[in-house]
């Protein structure tokens, strides 16, 4: 009993440190995005990604989105962010983000972990 509880505790510790590593790697991968996206609420060439997880697509205040992004019925979560970053034009056809996507699945997962950590 004691042993299995310890096992559970260390599994939890392991998965949360794995998560922290993903977020740290995602923050590095986010260097591809910083020219256009802030995480502090200021819009630039792209909308700020502050609080992106749980936001409706095309809804950040003060940013002039394309019609395509504004009318997309997409809510951002880990799944839709991964799909968008795989192929932005496939999930939101006609959106004007001048970025073709991230081909590497692990790098995308890290990026999504980082994006989801932005509150
Ligand atoms: C060259 C500029 C540029 C780069 C680089 C770029 N983006 Fe964007 N991004 C945009 C623009 C512009 C939009 C708005 C598109 C529209 O309105 O159609 C956008 C939209 C988005 C959205 C939807 C936001 C919302 O509020 O609905 C997400 C998510 C996003 N980008 C993530 C990323 C990530 C992650 C990266 C890096 C891997 C990245 N972008 C790289 C310019 C860029």
Image (cartoon, rainbow, N blue to C red):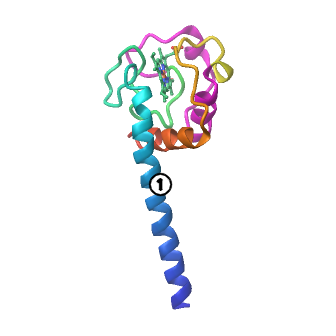
Q: Residue at x 54, y 11 (%)?
A: 96
Asked whether 76 or 91 is in front, the reply is 91
| In the rendered image, the vertical position of residue 115 relative to residue 44, given as above or below | below
Q: Secondary structure at mark 1?
A: helix
Q: Quadrant location of residue 105?
A: top right
Count of marks, rendered view:
1
Residue 16 on image: x %, y %: 46, 61
Q: Quadrant of the C terminus?
A: top left
Is residue 9 shown in magenta? no
| In the rendered image, the vertical position of residue 88 relative to residue 18, given as above or below | above
Q: Quadrant of the N terminus?
A: bottom right
Residue 18 on image: x %, y %: 48, 58
Asked whether 65 or 89 is in front, the reply is 89
Is residue 80 shown in magenta? yes
Dot 1, crowdedness within 10 Å: few (<14), some or many (≥20)? some
Residue 39 on image: x %, y %: 35, 31
| In the rendered image, the vertical position of residue 72 relative to residue 8, given as above or below | above
Residue, far right: 90
Q: Residue at x 52, y 14 (%)?
A: 98
Left/right of residue 88 with respect to residue 22 in the rendered view? right
Residue 82 on image: x %, y %: 60, 36
Left/right of residue 54 with respect to residue 42 in the rendered view? right
Q: Residue at x 50, y 43 (%)?
A: 110
Q: Residue at x 57, y 33 (%)?
A: 81
Left/right of residue 83 with respect to residue 119 in the rendered view? right
| In the rendered image, the vertical position of residue 100 relative to residue 30, given as above or below | above
Q: Which residues are magenta?
A: 59-88
Residue, far front: 104
- Check disc 1 and report the residue beneath it: 19
| In the image, the residue with mark 1 has its CB under 8 Å from the nearest atom of ligand 1 | no
């Amino acid at each position: 009993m004691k042993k299995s509880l310890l096992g559970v505790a260390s599994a939890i510790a392991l998965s949360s440190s794995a998560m922290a590593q993903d977020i740290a790697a995602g923050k590095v991968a986010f260097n591809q995005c910083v020219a256009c996206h802030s995480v502090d609420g200021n819009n630039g060439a792209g909308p700020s990604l502050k609080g992106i997880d749980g936001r409706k697509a095309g809804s950040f205040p003060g940013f002039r989105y394309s019609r395509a992004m504004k009318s997309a019925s997409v809510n951002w979560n880990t799944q839709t962010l991964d799909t968008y970053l795989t192929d932005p034009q496939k999930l939101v056809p006609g959106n004007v983000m001048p970025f073709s996507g991230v081909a590497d699945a692990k790098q995308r997962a890290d990026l999504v972990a980082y994006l989801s950590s932005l509150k």
